[in-house]
Amino acid sequence: MKKIQSALISVFYKDGLENIIQLLHKNDVKIYSTGGTQAFIEKLMVPVTPVESITNYPSILGGRVKTLHPLVFGGILGVRDDAGHVADMAAYNIPEIDLVIVDLYPFEKTVAAHTGDDESPIIEKIDIGGPSMLRAAAKNFKDVMVVALKKDYAAFEQILQEQAAETSIEQRREYAIKAFDVCTHYDTAISAYFHKTDLGTAFNKTKQTLRYGENPHQSATFHGELNELFHQLHGKELSYNNLVDVAAAIDMMHDLSPAFPAAENNDEPSFAIFKHTNACGAAQRETISKAWEAALSGDPESAFGGVLISNKIIDTETAIAISEIFFEVLMAPDFTEDALGILQKKKNRIILRVLKTPVGKNSSKTLLDGTLVQQHDEGNFAEWTEAGDRSCTETEKQDLIFANIICKHLKSNAIAIIKDKRLLGKGCGQTSRVDALRHAVEKAKQFSASLDGAVLASDAFFPFDDCVKIAHENGITAVIQPGGSIRDADSIAFCKANNMAMVITGLRHFKH
């Protein structure tokens, strides 16, 4: 642990700093400051030393140069256990600075609010000293604590209270990372402005450091505005794997329930359970409680530790039922007060109120030091061609529509078996389509589900008639698939010969 003896505070926004300044004063920390921040501290009746007393230079060039001076940066960058640094600091009367609290000029807000041709107001909001101090303090995190984000004031205030103005090396490193992230974000926004392009939009988002990536030895960050998508009502921070499953669940619910996440929607009550980006349970019923019960019954084993999503408000009855299993995340348009109280009894459960679905026109992934961008996979089917020897019954038709959506959101090769709008079995991520079907059948039989009268969806065409034969042998009566194989006729002929309905959609839904 290292005691903070001195602090440099220079911020554009002063709100939220009062308690921090009082705690620093209480712990005998010497405070240096500039301009408006200095005046703010003086109004709190807390002693403050102007930076000019260190540099012997006033703020010059209309405020463009205030802190850019060797005596300031020497105090931040000096390594306390380096004999050469200590000697230099003594020789030049450089004071040690143990804490830097700095925010940056509001460049993005200025750009957003700007009108007219005169860009000088924007140029003046390009901060020079602020990022330099943040980078210097973050570089020297071994000795210096840096606070770069207003949203971290509360957590830092707690550190001051609980640790009597001492900080650990782990805390200093954590806050240093955040400071570098702030500088990266800031520079990207400036670059995007000068390029006069929106290419910076994808990068010009809040960067959030996650606990770790897919595995504990992998670091990870999220670039985006989660607060615009969710209101987290309870639980620990979302992890990398949580976010991947959350995104997959929202994508599928968007297809099942177009009005989601409107709290009062007329869509059929739908519930889904996700594990490793694949649905392991899904159902539509007359109430959300019954939809949950049906979704869980499809694969109660895989539901353990899952990510759950509902398109309706979670009521007390549903909350009681859900609480009987262990889950990671639960998402819904809203929760009744009693339901939320029940769900919050386990401290780590992540409860999210979904504010909007972030389904855009494009999707992307990074690989090979580049980025792949593609149009989002919209729609369920392009056509509805009854290719069997008979038409679908109305029940089969509704199940096939549901099945094709579920299959669309499973990893390829994918098969989904549905009965009464309930996922009975699925095969996903297999290297052959027939293996995917065998997995789906085995999963359904594992939980004693009857496949008589069930329907089957395939995310891509059948290269042979082996899949429709296996389906028929297990009681499946209708199939939906995109078609397009040079041997489509083989599968169609088998269906005709065995009184099976077959729908060809003309729309493949690979998901790699």
Image (cartoon, grey):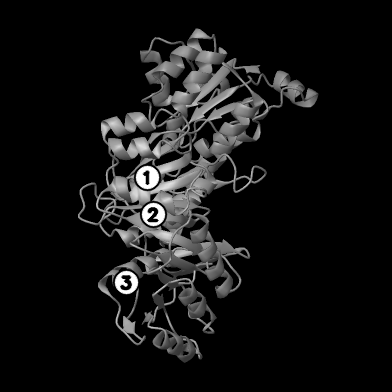
**Along the polypeptide, which appears first: circle 3 or circle 1?**
1
The mark found on residue 435 in the picture is: none
Q: Residue at x 32, y 40 (%)?
A: 318
Specify the amino acid type for callout 1: Met
Q: Secondary structure at mark 1?
A: strand
Task: Give yes or no for contact between labels 1 and 2 (Cβ–Cβ under 8 Å).
Answer: yes
Quickly name the residue at label 2.
250
As measured in the structure, the alpha-carbon distance from the residue carrying label 3 to the one carrying label 2 is 26 Å
Judge left or right: residue 98 versus residue 110: right
Displayed quadrant of residue 88: top right
Give the position of the N terminus as an image quadrant.
top right
Q: Position of residue 55 (x, y in %)?
A: 57, 24
Specify the amino acid type for callout 3: Glu
Q: Residue at x 79, y 23 (%)?
A: 83
Q: Secondary structure at mark 2?
A: helix
The mark found on residue 396 in the picture is: 3
Q: Residues within 10 Å of mark 3 (few under 14, many from 20)?
A: many
As measured in the structure, the alpha-carbon distance from the residue carrying label 1 to the one carrying label 2 is 9 Å
Q: Position of residue 273 (x, y in %)?
A: 43, 51
Judge left or right: residue 367 versus residue 381: right
Q: Position of residue 487 (x, y in %)?
A: 51, 90
Closest to the camera, between mark 3 and mark 1, is: 3
Q: Nearer the viewer, residue 467 or 413?
A: 467
Give the position of the C terminus as an image quadrant.
bottom right
**Along the polypeptide, which appears first: circle 1 or circle 2?**
2
Specify the amino acid type for callout 2: Ile
- As drawn, 305 above or below 23: below
Q: Nearer the viewer, residue 433 or 506?
A: 433
Q: Position of residue 226 (x, y in %)?
A: 41, 45
Quickly name the residue at label 1.
331
- As drawn, 38 above or below 444: above
Task: Determine if residue 388 is in view.
Answer: yes
